[in-house]
Amino acid sequence: MTDETTIRITKNGPMIVKGAARIEGADGEPWTDVPAGGNVALCRCGLSEVKPFCDGSHNAGGFDSAPTATDQPYPW
């Protein structure tokens, strides 16, 4: 078992964060109700009613994005 944190970009869906991660709002304050070390789905489509978390709105909204590591160079 590892303590590594991974972020997986899903096809036409959210980013799945697995492992320990601190999620902070725009004000720098942490979300306190995020399960420690659990899986968290973060919205990529912008349609979620519970941003930054995914609520499945991408399904009805027709979100279409499936990037892979070989698709784009790292931008900076």
Image (cartoon, grey):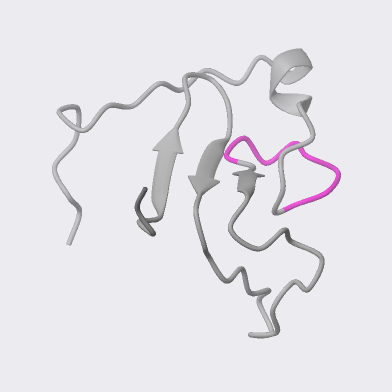
Quarter assignment of residue 71: top left
Considering only vertical position in the picture, is 22 above or below 16?
below
Q: How many marks?
A: 0
Q: Residue at x 75, y 52 (%)?
A: 51
Residue 55, x across and y down, in percent:
79, 35
Residue 3, x across and y down, in percent:
39, 59
Residue sitting at the far bottom: 28
Residue sitting at the far front: 1
**21, 67: nearer the viewer:** 21
Quarter assignment of residue 59: top right
Residue 71 relative to residue 14: left or right: left
Please tell me whether residue 11 belongs to the stretch shown in magenta: no
Residue 71 relative to residue 13: left or right: left
Magenta span covers which residues?
44-51
**75, 31: nearer the viewer:** 31
Tell me the chief SS of the magenta region: loop
Considering only vertical position in the picture, is 12 above or below 22?
above
Q: Residue at x 63, y 85 (%)?
A: 28
Considering only vertical position in the picture, is 19 above or below 55?
below
Considering only vertical position in the picture, is 46 above or below 68?
below
Quarter assignment of residue 67: top left
Residue 61, x across and y down, in percent:
73, 19
Residue 63 relative to residue 9: left or right: right
Q: Residue at x 78, y 39 (%)?
A: 48
